Amino acid sequence: MAVGLPENVFLTRLDAAANWARSNSLWPMPFATACCGIELMATAASRYDLARFGAEVMRFSPRQCDLLIVAGRVVMKMLPVLQRIWLQMPEPKWCISMGACACSGGVFDSYAVVQGVDRFIPVDMYVPGCPPRPEQLLAAIIDMQEKIRATGTVMGREFMARTSPMGPSPFDADELLRIKDASFVQLGGLSSPMGSVPRAGGSNHG
Amino acid sequence: MVDALELAARIGSPLTESTFRDNRRMDVAATHILPLLTTLKNDFGFNMLIDLTAVDYLEYEGARDRFGVVYLLLNVDSGERLILRTAVNLPEATLPTATGLWRGADWMEREVFDMFGIRFAGHPDLRRILMPDEFTEFPLRKDYPVKGRGERHNFPVITRAGS
Ligand code: SF4
């Protein structure tokens, strides 16, 4: 080299060196609450072999992890647990929201299911699918590594800019829909959105 | 096969019997559900409570009562099954507990309480079992909206700056 460095010495930025180390040894925290968790297990198992990307050390203690993988639907009773796990993870940390349920509530648009974990914790990467195939999760982890390499800083300055959760739909739109649905039930006691359509099986009731 | 007439005579209250496929079902007044369960367990060998659940008949065609509480019994020795239903109404939807007969009724009654708000007098520990303790509604009642009343949005938001 022109500057006359001795062998086995190279010049780099501290940020790049830190990113290189971090991105190649992600320690996932599996938050597997439903069927997506099975795909997560498959991803880590021998056939798909997450170890090829340096992220095979699943830890069940959040204190040892830096990548939260939310796999499955999160209900309102579980959300405080998820938030606490996120808070217990040391910086720098990232979050992958895996599957339609974790990203948006999926088909479970009910009173108990949180409509996307990104409303309440920060999410860096979304994986669509129901469930996503292990390849998709692998792709997400590779993208995550790319993101860390591209934006990471040794002191975690890149996190300062991201101060709000980036949810897919604002609360208001969802709340309006909900109130519209609810008003059918409340209007005049017995009126229903079905009008006077007879219910099947009514004659079975004694 | 237990005889509905004989049962009715024992508990001193009429029973309405019906069948669907091979299910035998009996309707009983709420005041007589506990004597009926006791008789069935002690004298007719229905030693297993398979399930205890409830139905909300709000807006149900031809329904006279708000809730039906359903007991599924099994006689383990003979394989005979029996389905009992009793009606409760608001405002004080209360039934006697079956935990004295079957210990397994404990969590099932808690679930019915959690989902429908039906109370079981004498239950040792009538708390919510599925929903969080601070939840105030009964989600399986038909006048509760499917999407809830915004409880699922009621959480602090954790941002990058705050974590
Ligand atoms: S996205 Fe599909 S596979 Fe994943 S948790 Fe939801 S329902 Fe299950």
Image (cartoon, grey):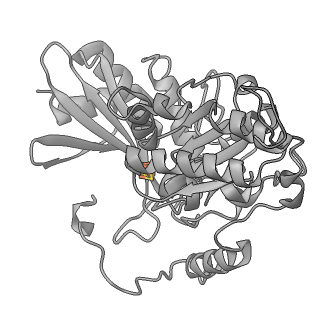
Q: Is residue A81 above or below residue A169?
A: above
Q: Is residue A202 above or below residue B39?
A: below
Q: Is residue A143 left or right of residue B29?
A: right
Q: Is residue B48 above or below residue B68?
A: above
Where residue A61 sits, quadrant-wise, is: top right
Q: Residue sitting at 64 percent across and 74 percent down?
A: A174
Q: Is residue B27 left or right of residue A92?
A: left
Instruction: Give residue A151's position: percent from left, percent from top.
Output: 76, 54
Instruction: Give residue A155's position: percent from left, percent from top.
Output: 90, 42
Q: Residue sitting at 51 percent across and 63 percent down?
A: B142
Residue B116 appears in the rendering: no
Residue closest to the eye, B73 or A38? A38
Q: Residue sitting at 59 percent across and 41 percent down?
A: A69
Residue B115 appears in the rendering: yes
Quadrant in which the N terminus of chain B appears: top left
Q: Residue sitting at 37 percent across and 48 percent down?
A: A133
Q: Is residue B159 left or right of residue B115?
A: right
Instruction: Give residue A36's position: percent from left, percent from top.
Output: 44, 43
Instruction: Give residue B93's position: percent from left, percent from top.
Output: 58, 48
Where residue A38 sits, quadrant-wise, is: top left
Q: Is residue A199 above or below residue A104?
A: below
Quadrant in which the C terminus of chain B appears: top right
Q: Of all residues shown, which one is farthest toward the bottom?
A: A195
